[in-house]
Amino acid sequence: MKLISVIADNWKMDGGVAFGVVPKLIWSRKHEADENNAIDITTRCLLIIHKERKILIDVGLGDKRNEKYYAVRYREPGISILNSLKNAGFAADDITDVLFTHLHDDHVGAATRIDENGNVVCVFEKAKYWVSNAHWDWAMNPNKRETAAFFKDNLEPLQESGRLHILEEGMQPFHEITLKIFNGHTRGQIIPFIHTGSHTIVYMGDFIPTQSNIPIPFIPSVDIEPLVTLIEKEEFLNEAADKQHILFFEHDAAVECCTVMRSEKGVVADRSFNLNEINL
C-alpha cells in the first residue's frame, strides 16, 4: 500500500467558524488571523494505491461557482486536485474510486466540472463514487442550516453516471480500510481508518479538521450537533491514544499528521510530522 498526500485547495476560513465557542484570545496563539479574522486552511486529500485500485479521498472545491463565491474563500491560485495529482504522476482517469467523507462543497465540488457545451460532467470518468447512505439522504434533503453547502450540480452528475455507490453503515468495500460513521459535523460522515500493516492512519475529514481542534471544546461552529461531536471526539481520542493511531488532517495548513497521548489535561497532541516521514 502507498499513500500520497495531495492538496486540492489552499484557502482561508473565519477563525470563529473554525473553533466555535473557543475565544480568539486562545485559538490565535496557534493561528494568526488576518484583517478579516480569517486563518489559513488547506484541503488535503489522500490518494491510496493498493493493488489494482487507486482510491482518492475527497477532492476539494473545484471551479464551478462564481467569482463572488470564491472571493470570500481567498483561494490560492493554481492549486487544484488535478494539478496535485499530475505532480504526483497521476491523471483523473487513473483514479478507480473516489471516497467522499461527506458532500459539503469543499469536499466534493471538484468531482464535477462544466464542459465546453456548458454541461456539468464528472471529472473522474472511470471511478466509482462512494458515500454513506445516511449522508446521501441528508444531502439530497438538506436542512436550512446546511443547504448552502450542498449543490445539485455536485451531486446529480454523480448519480446520473451510474457509478455512485451508496454505503449502508457497516459496509466495507475496500481491503485494509475500515469505514466508520461520525454524525456530529454532519449526518453520516465517513471517516476512513487505513491499515498499512505498521500503522493505522485515520483520515480526519471534518471530524477533527486540524490539530488545534483536538481539545474536546474546540468544535467548529458549523457542526450541526456539537454535543454529538463532543462525545464522538472523546471516545475516538481515547482509542487513538491507546492504539497509537496516526491522525491525518484534511484542513490543517501547517500540520499534516500527528499522534496523540494521554495527559493530565486529557488526550492531547503528541508528535507532529508529515506522512512521508513514517515507514508505512
Image (cartoon, rainbow, N blue to C red):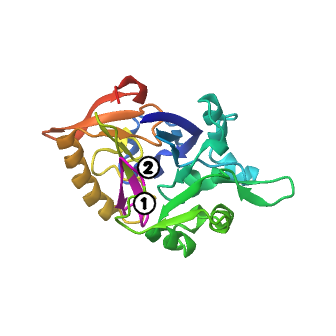
227 or 177: nearer the eye?
177
Residue 189 has which mark? Answer: 1
**Residue at horizontal 41 percent and vertical 69 percent from the top:** 168
Q: Find residue 83 and report its horizontal and vertical position in percent.
A: 66, 35
**Quadrant in which the C terminus appears:** top left
Q: Residues within 10 Å of mark 2 (few under 14, many from 20)?
A: many
Q: Is residue 162 left or right of residue 166?
A: right
217 to 212, vertically: above or below = below
Q: Amino acid at mark 2?
A: Gly
Q: Find residue 275 and report its horizontal and vertical position in percent.
A: 41, 30
170 to 246, vertically: above or below = below
240 or 89: nearer the eye?
89
Write down the region rendered in magenta.
174-191
Q: CA distance from mark 1 to mark 2?
A: 8 Å
Q: Amino acid at mark 1?
A: Gln
242 or 48: nearer the eye?
48
Residue beneath disc 2: 205
